[in-house]
Amino acid sequence: MRVPVSWLKEYVPFDEPVEDVAGRLVISSCEVDRIVRRGVPDTDGNLGRYLVGKVVEAGKHPNADRLQLCRVDVGDSEPRQIVCGAWNFGTGATVAVALPGAVLPDGQKLEQAKLRGEVSNGMILSERELDLGVEHSGILVLEEGPEPGTPLADVLPLSDDVLELENGHNRPDLLSVYGIAREVAALLGNELAPPPGADPPRADEEPVDVQIEDFEGCPRYIGRTFRDVRIAPSPPWLKARLVAAGMRPVSNVVDITNYAMLGLGNPLHAFDQSKLRGRRIVVRRARKGEQMRTLDDTLRELDERDLVIADAERAVAIAGIMGSLESEVDDQTTEVLLEAANFEPLTIHRSSERLRLRTEGSNRWEKGVDPYLAEQAAKLATQLLVELTGARWTGDVDKRHELPERPVVHLRPERTDLLVGLRTEPDDQRTILERIGFEVALDWNVTVPTWRARDVTREADLVEEVARFRLDDVPFTLPQRTVMFGRLTKDQRLRRTVEDVLVGCGLSEAYNWSLVPVDDDPRAIRLPEPLSADQAVLRTTLRHGLIESAQRNVDGGAEDVGLFEIARVYLPTGKKLPEERWRLGAIASGGFRRAKGVVETLHEALKVELRVAAAPQPFLHPGKAARFASGWVGELHPALLDGTWGMFELDLPTLYEAVPDVVHYEDVITYPPVRQDLAFVVDEAVPAGALIDAAREAAGDELREMRPFDVYRGGQVGPGKKSIAFAVTFQSGIKTLTDEEAADLRERIVTALRERFGAELRA
Amino acid sequence: MDVEALEREAQGAVAAASTRVALDEARVRYLGRKSQLKQALRGVRDRESGMTLNAARERLEAAFAAREADLDRAELDRALTEDTVDVTLPGEEFARGHLHLLTQMRREIEDTFLGLGYEVFDGPEVEEVSYNFDALNTPEGHPSRSPVDTFYVSDDVVLRTHTSPGQIRYMEAHEPPVYMVSLGRCYRRDTPDPTHTPTFHQVEGLAVDRTITLADLKGTLLYLARVLFGEERDVRVRTSFFPFTEPSAEFDVSCFLCSGRGCNVCKWSGWIEMGGCGVVDPNVFAHVGYDSERWSGFAFGLGIDRIAMLRHGVPDLRLHWENDLRYLEQF
Ligand SMILES: [Zn+2]
């Protein structure tokens, strides 16, 4: 919403700088995107170089067929000679003149010039050159009246500030100059003018045939008819206001409806009454298959939920959104039916979305316009139609349902203080509310004005109305606590540990999209309307994003890549919501051993025992793939990504589950350990882990550690065999092991491995 | 024999010896078997002159030992200077990974609120419409419900558009008082560009207690703003509208780039928009069965990605999602 300040001041005079007023609006009413200075620059006496002129003489330029040579009286002793390119005026015309030295709205400085040999001592201006309109085929011819030499700024709004406001969803009353004026008046404590528009006397009592078939969609329809309308361009002041407010002037009738909409917030529509079949208006839902060509020359297919304005035969407007081309006011129009109605927001919203047709009108209707406002808007438009188009007002009808009662809400002034945390005297609360149109009874029953009936229905809403005028005064405090519970849960603490361990392992953290193009699980949740095919399915594994990120880094020239991600996956359950599980995934150049090493380090850090077993996965190297309690680890199948990559993915809650709450001390200091190296020859298929498990079983707790450090294959061990060397540590927590006890432990291991696996101890 | 003169001469020789060889020569001359002193000691007859000679000998031995230690240390230092490294060359490299900037921000914000006595909680990302909109008092027809803005999984399930539905779930499960923050992924149908990504991270805070006020909200936001952007920052709140708070406001922090003088980041206003906030709407309390006459609350929310972008000068939000090590390793 763009609010020209000169227009705003018509409803609420103020002397404060515009910046200050904008600053107050920002805090209490609505966002102000910026303040735009438009029109003729008002600096260094520039406005003084713009004067009203009277053309004393006009004729063809002696050396140029397309130019006029004029003598223009601008109040000096002698008329000025000015060369002009337009021909839409002659001797006697009152015109707008800029003198040499004037800076134009586009920033250009006007110089005295010689055009085809004749001096031009100024410039006769078009409305576009003054930024007052879009017309530039001819110059701006002013109404007769002002004396030559009158400052042009006294006659035309030459320069203006425009507030560019952003309006929220819930305050349709702010979508008008008058609505903003009401806020400004309350903020500054200034007087607000009564709303613009007063009915002129009616010239006739012709009946107006309006029938509302759907009061739900259209609770009110004021139809007013006019005869002897003369279609013409609007006067400069009106065009200037529309242009400053961001609308393009069209013709006086259309401009008047737009002006009343901008001024008061109620969109209006004008039909050519002679084009309405049966001279009749019916408000109804569209018929199945009904079509209409809208003003933008598009054929629209309507459906039975669209509300339309129809004549006796066909739709002539999509209610509140756009009129039809066939019923449009044109140059020949002399009879007008003015529509000042009220439409229900959801209907307009739905049609506007479905037709992808957003207009100034639909934008207001879908936010909910005050149904009482239609009458004032009709008055303003009627007054202007009579004043500016020469029309006679001949008919009037106001069809409506019961209009909603104004809500009455009780306010406890102390409740405001309690919620805001700042004392506001009851009298001050009353004053704030009354300034914005609320009526406060002595018992604090507050009657809400019609234009706020939608969004103020409860005490909390009244508290907000007071609070928004005091936001800057509210102090900065912290809650008074009686109970404290600030701590992370076990899972949240462990997540940080996991992150830190992985960083310590040299991996960096990646963030990948939750939505992927394809997922392993055919049942994975697919969005019915994805933003793109790349982000269509909710992932059930972190693998794809990590592979893609690794690839991107390789493409970017990175040599050593290690990435991990901690995020949720979304497992289909067949119920309404999927199961969301926190997962940890990682990818690292270096293959199986690197990935396995990270998994081991992580388990070690969390004091969780890791037991792995070979287990193939379709996306892993078939010989380098394993499972463990919470996930898998392996070497990525080289067909999926060039190079040698280790990967793993695990389910974090499963891992956390295994983390002990408390770690208990073990005495590994008091009694000395006994260290030995033992190498066993076994069949190729026997995994080291199986030997360790068997050894533990045989030797018990006094086998402190058994760590494989070498695997040897070759001549000495024979074909199909391998030798695994272990560093073995025996230790007791309660005594020093004797040589005999150590030898016995060793013998138990050797025996067990021979019996279980046919393992031979190498000398 | 003049013992004093002899000792003076010997001390002079110790001080003059600048090498181990010279010192050893002096030692032989003054303390050796054939030295004057030793000879005198052997020929001593009376107790008194014996004590004088022995004392002189002890002092000389100590002087030789001290000088010897000095010379050894000097010799070692001389040898070490030949083993000099270029200290500006790099040390041993350790492979160290990097936490994502957004994780660092997450921890910073979590820690701030843990310090204020809040819990950390996060609800589901795939969320029921009833939690994402209805329970938060968002009416039918509100633009945020439109499939133009929101990812629908089905008619009654969406990808959550904010972390707020987590508040509802939390309140349903807990009696007041409540002090909690949620941080997590949210989704809106924005085509990716430098300032939009269809997935983003939000932090949302909720406090419900006997006497929570708008002033408490302002104070909490000021505390957060100063943690994130420095002690000199100010906070202001502007009136706004959200269905789930009443009064509603947006909050700004004084620009940390220009300190309020005006720059292109704050669009010459001196303030940078942070997020939305307000006093919890009584309808939200009614939905979870809290009595709004006995309890009051505040809630606020802000986008973590954007704050990270502003604070660290990251030019494009999409960089958070590309996982380029050249980006990740900077933080
Ligand atoms: Zn700034």
Image (cartoon, rainbow, N blue to C red):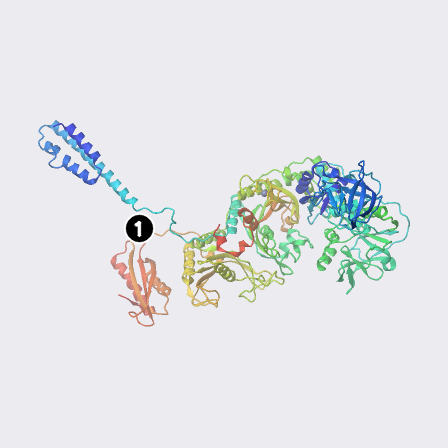
Q: Nearer the viewer, residue A658 or A389?
A: A389
Q: Position of residue A138 (x, y in %)?
A: 79, 49
Give the image quarter of residue A350. bottom right
Q: Is residue B319 above or below residue A419?
A: below
Left or right of residue A195: residue A702 = left
Residue at the image position 82 percent from the left and 61 percent from the top? A314
Which quadrant of the render holds ligand 1? Answer: top right
Q: Nearer the viewer, residue A77 or A407?
A: A77
Q: Is any atom of residue A555 visible in this view? A: yes
Tell me the quarter of the image containing the C terminus of chain A: bottom left
Q: Is residue A533 above or below residue A16?
A: below
Residue at the image position 22 percent from the left and 34 percent from the top? B15
Q: Residue furthest bottom?
A: A719
Q: Position of residue B158 (x, y in %)?
A: 62, 58
Q: Position of residue A628 (x, y in %)?
A: 44, 62
Q: Is residue A154 above or below residue A758?
A: above
Write down the residue under mark 1. Answer: A670
Q: Nearer the viewer, residue A511 or A707?
A: A511
Q: How many marks?
A: 1
Q: Is residue B249 above or below residue A601?
A: above
Q: Position of residue A27 (x, y in %)?
A: 66, 41
Say what secondary structure mark 1 lies in: loop
